[in-house]
């Protein structure tokens, strides 16, 4: 990635003297280290899977157990650009797993129709960056279908899968995290997993939910996140946050890839500052678990939220506003947001754009010393 960055900057650029290869390499290596989750014994036998495998396994279960389930999207029949649907067409047939034209508006519009007609529908948007042509279909049609019909009809079960987030070289059109755009839309659920086990359980919950769900998949984790995943059919709750690490001094909130950055930050805070952090995985952006978050902030008195999307209008703003109202008398310091900057997602400067562990660590220091 850093070689690509130097190539883009160019030998004669005035920036070359300021950003050298070692600097870019060092910054790119500090993004995150994946730490696998351990599956509970209650879920039975487990198998080693990456995120892509676990999603494929979840969709395989959905297709096998519900004969109305259909999966479609661009290149889905041959396995998709990330190979998450590989083998499903051969196993279940081209009537249930099939390709669509390159039209996100058409994909989601057709998905709403199949869901309304009674099919359990899984639609894939090849990259979350390209979901915007389908914005009207999601916001004005899928989200409002039950409400405007007086509960006579609905557009669920409908799940829209979309790979999201930074990947190291995606630039403007293959790196965005658009969850906040849809969080302003009552009637949909927004889910972001942090790893293979969670992805399988949450995707199966989405597929069986009566509400339309947008399932954002951190694509950098497709191959890099590997852990033991229960091979059976299981679900995880869609409206309940998970406390990953218990602590007493600072509440830290994230979702998706950012949680692996934050786990390292929490360990750094304990080792270097003797600060105990409580790390919470929101899991579901809409609806989100205010109760768990507020209970934690009442205990710690401090809150930091981090996400890759730009800071202005990011979902961290909604969390901060709600927590400020619920926990005002308990706060010991202003709430910190560590997010992407208010710029288009960069290519060469991605390492500097990211809310990495150093930016998050500095925010914790500000909270403690306020």
Image (cartoon, rainbow, N blue to C red):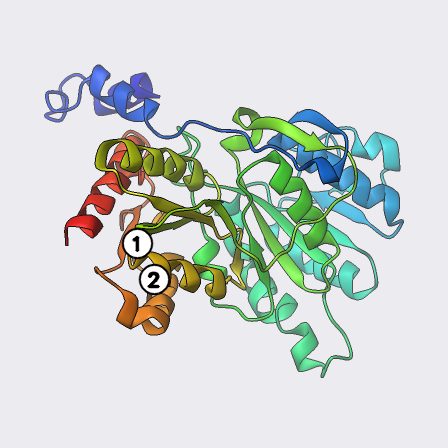
Label number found at residue 317: 2
Q: Distance between the residues labelled 2 and 1?
A: 8 Å
List the residue tagged with mark 1. 311
Residue 281, given in percent of the width and then of the height, sits at 48, 48
Residue 222, given in percent of the width and then of the height, sits at 57, 30
Query: Which residue occupies the foreground of this view, 309 or 255?
Result: 255
Label number found at residue 340: none
Instruction: Give neighbour class at mark 1: few <14, some 14-19, many 20+ (Cα, 10 Å).
Output: some
Sequence-wise first label, 2 or 1: 1
Q: Which residue is drawn at 23% across and 32% down?
A: 272
Query: Which residue occupies the foreground of this view, 276 or 244?
Result: 276
Query: Which residue occupies the foreground of this view, 16 or 290?
Result: 290
Residue 283, given in percent of the width and then of the height, sits at 53, 51
Q: Report if residue 253 is visible in the image.
A: yes
Total numbered badges shown on the rendered structure: 2
- Tags 2 and 1 touching, CB below 8 Å: yes
Quadrant where the N terminus is found in the figure: top left
Q: Report if residue 83 is visible in the image.
A: no
**Quarter location, residue 189:** bottom right
Q: Residue at x 87, y 42 (%)?
A: 64
**Quarter location, residue 348:** top left
Above-or-below relation of 151 to 11: below
Please state if 313 lies on the left or on the right of 230 as rendered: left
Quadrant where the C terminus is found in the figure: bottom left
**Quarter location, residue 57:** top right
Above-or-below relation of 62 to 209: above
């Amino acid at each position: 990635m850093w070689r690509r960055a130097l190539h883009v900057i160019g030998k004669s650029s005035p920036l070359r003297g300021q950003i050298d290869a070692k600097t870019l390499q060092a910054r790119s290596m500090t993004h995150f280290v994946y730490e696998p989750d351990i599956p509970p014994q209650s879920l039975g036998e487990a198998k080693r899977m990456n995120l892509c495998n676990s999603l494929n396994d979840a969709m395989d279960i959905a297709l096998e157990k519900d004969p109305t389930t259909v999966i479609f999207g661009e290149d889905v029949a041959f396995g998709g650009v990330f190979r998450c649907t590989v083998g499903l067409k051969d196993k279940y047939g081209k009537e249930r797993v099939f390709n669509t034209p390159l039209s996100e508006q058409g994909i989601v519009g057709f998905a709403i129709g199949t869901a309304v007609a009674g099919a359990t529908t899984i639609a894939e948007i090849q990259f979350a960056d390209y979901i915007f042509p389908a914005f009207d279909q999601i916001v004005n049609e899928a989200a409002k279908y039950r409400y405007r019909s007086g509960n006579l009809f609905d557009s669920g079960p409908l799940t829209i899968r979309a790979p999201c987030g930074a990947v190291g070289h995606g630039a403007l059109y293959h790196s965005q995290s658009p969850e906040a755009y849809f969080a302003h839309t009552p009637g949909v659920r927004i889910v972001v997993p942090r790893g293979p086990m969670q992805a399988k359980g949450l995707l199966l919950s989405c597929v069986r939910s009566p509400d339309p769900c947008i399932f954002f998949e951190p694509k950098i984790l497709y191959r890099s996140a590997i852990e033991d995943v229960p091979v059976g059919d299981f679900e995880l709750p869609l409206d309940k946050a998970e406390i990953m690490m218990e602590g007493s001094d600072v509440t830290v909130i994230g979702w998706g890839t950012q949680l692996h950055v934050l786990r390292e930050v929490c360990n750094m805070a304990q080792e270097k500052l003797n600060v105990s952090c409580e790390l919470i995985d929101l899991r579901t952006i809409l609806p989100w678990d205010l109760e768990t978050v507020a209970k934690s902030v009442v205990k710690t008195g401090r809150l930091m939220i981090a996400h890759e999307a730009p800071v202005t209008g990011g979902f961290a703003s909604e969390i901060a506003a709600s927590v400020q109202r619920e926990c005002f008398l308990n706060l010991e310091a202003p709430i910190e947001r560590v997010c992407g900057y208010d710029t288009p997602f960069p290519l060469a400067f991605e390492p500097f754009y990211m809310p990495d562990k150093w930016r998050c660590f500095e925010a914790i220091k500000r909270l403690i010393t306020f």
